[in-house]
Image (cartoon, helix red, strand yellow):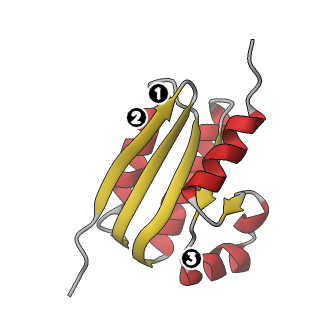
Amino acid sequence: MTDAFHIDVPHTDAALAVIALSGEFDIAAAPAVRARALELIANGHPDLVADLSGVTFCDSSGLGALVGIWRCAKDADGSLTLAAIPDRLSRLLSVTGMDAFLPAYSSADAALAARQGNRTTA
């Protein structure tokens, strides 16, 4: 039995957006997550926080989507920050070395506060 997958965007502010994922982040969900994240980047939100607190399962397709989003954000002079990473995904990030490139926080609120603190005002 699979958990229905949902993508929400509970926060957008200037260059920053939070994309909250819930359910199984697998080969079926990865293209939709990537498309939604790239849409946010194209709409002026190159700094993304991925709230993974609701993710019940993540495979290599989910990891691949995150890496692709990170690259696109970086190309747009933005960033990808992860929040509330499930254990299995944390292990995948560590094994692949991506944990060195993707900052992670215990919650979306902590990640959001850190990202907002990194932006300077004009």
Task: Give SS at disc 3.
Answer: helix
Label of residue 89 in the image: 3
Q: Position of residue 95 (x, y in %)?
A: 71, 80
Relative height, residue 100 to residue 69 (above, below): below
Q: Is residue 81 visible?
A: no
- Residue at point 55%, 83% (across, down): 88
Pick the front one: 102 or 17: 17
Label of residue 42 in the image: 1
Task: Categorize mark 2 by other alpha carbons within 10 Å: few (<14), some (14-19), many (20+).
Answer: few
- Residue at point 60%, 39% (across, down): 73
- Amino acid beneath label 1: Ala
Task: Give SS at disc 2.
Answer: helix
Relative height, residue 96 to residue 105 (above, below): below
Q: Position of residue 107 (x, y in %)?
A: 59, 62
Relative height, residue 43 to residue 111 (above, below): above
Pick the front one: 51 or 36: 51
- Amino acid beneath label 3: Leu
Pick the front one: 12 or 2: 12
Mark 1 → mark 2, Cα distance in angstroms: 5 Å
- Residue at point 27%, 66% (across, down): 5
Residue farthest to the bottom? 1
Indicate which disc, 3 or 2, sits on the residue closer to the N terminus.
Answer: 2
Mark 1 → mark 3, Cα distance in angstroms: 26 Å
| Horizontal relation, residue 22 to residue 19: left or right | left
Q: Position of residue 76 (x, y in %)?
A: 62, 30
In the picture of the structure, the residue carrying the numbered disc 2 is 39
Q: Are marks 3 and 2 in contact (CB under 8 Å)?
A: no
Q: Are marks 1 and 2 in contact (CB under 8 Å)?
A: yes
